Amino acid sequence: MELGAETTLLLALSTGPGFGLELIERVALRSKGLLRLNHGGAYLALQRLAARGLVHGWTRKLSRSGRPRRYYELTPEGILHAEQLRLSLDGLLRERQSRPTPAETRAMADRVSRSGSLSASVIRLRDAPRRPL
């Protein structure tokens, strides 16, 4: 599974239909700004999802601007696919729900300390004056 534009748009559409810019904003809002789709990539991804039968699009003319807007929603197959993606991501994120034990925390701190000491030794060795043989 790739967490690309198609996946994020499928998950965004699982909360209901929307048009391109609205879906881009929905992804950014739900990810607290960590995931941001560019306009071109989002629209191409929506076209690919439609070609795969996962989303259905329709055009609606807006009375204010007179410009038509393309809305998208999940198809029944898209709903199943989005749910499978959500379950996969939930499993990945919930793999370890407990905090490390104090012993595990000490072991991690010891590994970091030994790694730092080793790095410092390598730097000293690298920077030491060289003696002729």
Image (cartoon, helix red, strand yellow):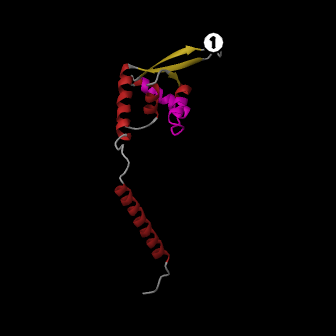
Residue under pointer 1:
63
Residue 88 in which image quadrant: top left
Query: Which corner quadrant holds the C terminus?
Result: bottom left
How many marks do you count on the picture?
1
Residue 126 versus residue 38 in the image, above or below: below
Q: Write the start and end of the magenta stretch as one range.
A: 24-50
Identified at 37% across, 19% down, the residue is: 76
Identified at 38% across, 23% down, the residue is: 79
Identified at 54% across, 33% down, the residue is: 29
Residue 10 versus residue 132 in the image, above or below: above
Disc 1 is placed on an element classified as loop
Name the residue type under label 1: Ser
Please check the rendered image and state whether residue 13 is part of the magenta-colored stretch, yes or no: no
Identified at 52% across, 40% down, the residue is: 34
Q: Going by the image, does 26 lie left or right of 113?
A: right
Image spot of residue 54 (x, y percent): 40, 24
Q: Residue most toward the top? A: 63
Query: Which corner quadrant holds the N terminus?
Result: top left
Magenta part mainly helix, strand or loop?
Answer: helix
